[in-house]
Image (cartoon, rainbow, N blue to C red):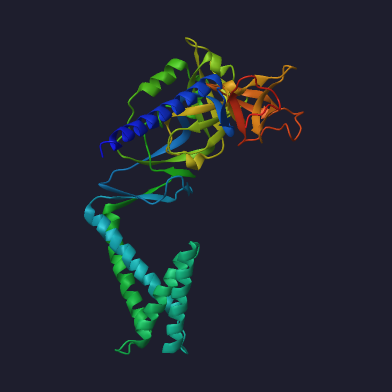
């Protein structure tokens, strides 16, 4: 046992020396042969700038007095002149009465539908078959996500079950009871309607346009007619103000088809603009919007006002007002490679070396965009198929004495 201890120590010492030697050799090779590669991949980069401004539209604010407000139109919905867009209730009782009327009208509609679709020759078995078919149709529409006829299908099923209860209930009531119930509902609805006229007010659209339930107070502070004379100082004042909607505001009607974005820009950036520009807004809307450059104001302390306009996406931007937008000057798409990967051959052509099999292969490229620590490149127009750089290839970043055809594997 005592002779085994020196042997164990010797083996452990030998193992430690082997590990240290391996690490040393690895470090020496890394220092003296700095061969490194990376994978090239496709990328799109925007040459852009953030700008702050205001969305401007032609807007008519709706006002009214009431304890409770019920908006009848969705955001961005098209409305006609004099169309009912909201209801004002003077009390909670008035709102409950309106909800009761809607429930009665729905029941009445179902009874009328059941009465109009009744048939004297139907028996219990055929009625059951119709109900089963209606359930199957409704299930199919829901499972397939087809909601185009969902309301009609649901109403048909309700009417069939209601009709079944009148035709085949235990009391033996006939379809004539449906008409009696319809008359009762009509009487109740008429009475409730008379009461509602005293404490419920209808709000109608003064003109046709798009309905918006959002009122922020800028509607009266800046309009499209103000944009021709808008200055840097006046726009900055509007941007810095704390604006709130006036009391009694219920929503607004957006008219016309054009809308505008007025922003402050430095003179150098504004000089880069062409007749159109792409903007990406930061809130409530996703995607680029192509807009026309309508006006560039006179310079004020190195800054100017730029007014952009478009006649698209109006229904989608009804909630936008004070915005920080990304103004895209140019979009570059290419293959991203590290700056250290760019090399030049004996003719002065720029390119990269790829690892093809066990050899380094020089592939000429054109640099189309310079970023921080990388380039976006594209294959040169005269590159052959074998010289054509493609995304996903392994490219050489660092190597000693690199040349076309060198064994690197």
Residue 208 in the figure: left or right of residue 92: right
Residue 211 in the figure: left or right of residue 7: right
Whether residue 231 is visible, yes or no, is yes
Q: Quadrant of the N terminus?
A: top left
Instruction: Please tell me which residue lies in front, 382 or 7.
Output: 7
Against 100, is 234 above or below?
Answer: above
Residue 386 in the figure: left or right of residue 4: right
Residue 27 image offset from top left, x and y in percent: 47, 23
Instruction: Please tell me which residue lies in front, 404 or 235.
Output: 404
Give the mark count: 0
Instruction: Tell me which corner region of the image, top left, top right, bottom left or bottom right, holds residue 156.
Output: bottom left
Q: Quadrant of the C terminus?
A: top right
Residue 88 in the figure: left or right of residue 408: left
Against 104, is 306 above or below?
Answer: above
Instruction: Please tell me which residue lies in front, 198 or 243.
Output: 243
Against 20, is 315 above or below?
Answer: below
Instruction: Tell me which corner region of the image, top left, top right, bottom left or bottom right, holds residue 294.
Output: top right
Whether residue 207 is visible, yes or no, is no
Instruction: Please tell me which residue lies in front, 323 or 40.
Output: 40
Q: Residue at x 41, y 75 (%)?
A: 159
Q: Residue at x 43, y 20 (%)?
A: 235
Residue 274 image offset from top left, x and y in percent: 62, 23
Residue 100 image offset from top left, x and y in percent: 28, 63
Residue 121 image offset from top left, x and y in percent: 47, 90
């Amino acid at each position: 046992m005592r002779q085994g201890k020196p042997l164990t120590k010797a083996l452990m010492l030998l193992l430690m020396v082997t590990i240290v030697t391996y690490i040393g050799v690895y470090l020496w090779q890394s220092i003296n042969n700095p061969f490194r590669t990376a994978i090239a991949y496709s990328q799109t980069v925007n040459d852009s700038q953030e700008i702050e401004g205001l969305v401007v539209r032609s807007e008519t604010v709706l006002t009214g007095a009431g304890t409770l407000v019920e908006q009848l139109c969705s955001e961005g919905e098209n409305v006609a002149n004099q169309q009912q867009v909201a209801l004002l209730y003077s009390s909670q009782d008035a709102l409950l009465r309106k909800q009761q009327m809607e429930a009665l009208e729905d029941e009445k509609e179902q009874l009328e539908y059941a009465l109009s679709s009744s048939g004297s020759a139907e028996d219990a078995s055929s009625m059951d078959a119709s109900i089963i078919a209606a359930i199957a149709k409704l299930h199919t529409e829901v499972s397939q996500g087809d909601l185009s006829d969902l309301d009609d299908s649901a109403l048909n099923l309700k009417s069939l079950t209601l009709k079944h209860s009148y035709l085949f209930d235990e009391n033996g009531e006939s379809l004539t009871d449906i008409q009696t119930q319809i008359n009762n509902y009509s009487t109740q609805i008429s009475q409730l309607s008379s009461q509602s006229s005293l404490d419920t007010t209808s709000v109608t659209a003064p003109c046709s346009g798009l309905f918006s339930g959002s009122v922020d107070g800028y509607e009266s502070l800046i309009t499209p007619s103000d944009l021709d004379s808008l200055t840097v100082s006046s726009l900055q004042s509007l941007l810095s103000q704390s604006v709130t909607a006036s009391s009694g505001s219920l929503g607004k009607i957006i008219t016309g088809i054009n809308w505008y974005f007025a922003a402050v820009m430095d003179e150098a950036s504004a000089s880069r603009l062409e007749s159109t520009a792409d903007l990406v807004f930061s809130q409530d809307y996703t995607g680029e919007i192509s807009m026309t450059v309508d006006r560039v104001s006179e310079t004020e302390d190195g800054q100017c006002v730029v007014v952009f306009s478009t006649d698209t996406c109006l229904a989608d931007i009804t909630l936008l007002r004070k915005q920080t937008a990304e103004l895209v000057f140019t979009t570059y798409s290419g293959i991203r490679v590290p700056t250290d990967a760019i090399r030049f051959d004996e003719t002065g052509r720029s390119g990269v070396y790829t690892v093809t099999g066990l050899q380094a292969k020089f592939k000429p490229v054109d640099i189309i965009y310079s970023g921080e620590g990388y380039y976006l490149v594209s294959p040169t127009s005269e590159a052959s198929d074998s010289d054509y750089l493609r995304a996903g290839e392994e490219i050489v970043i660092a190597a000693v004495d690199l040349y076309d055809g060198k064994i690197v594997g």
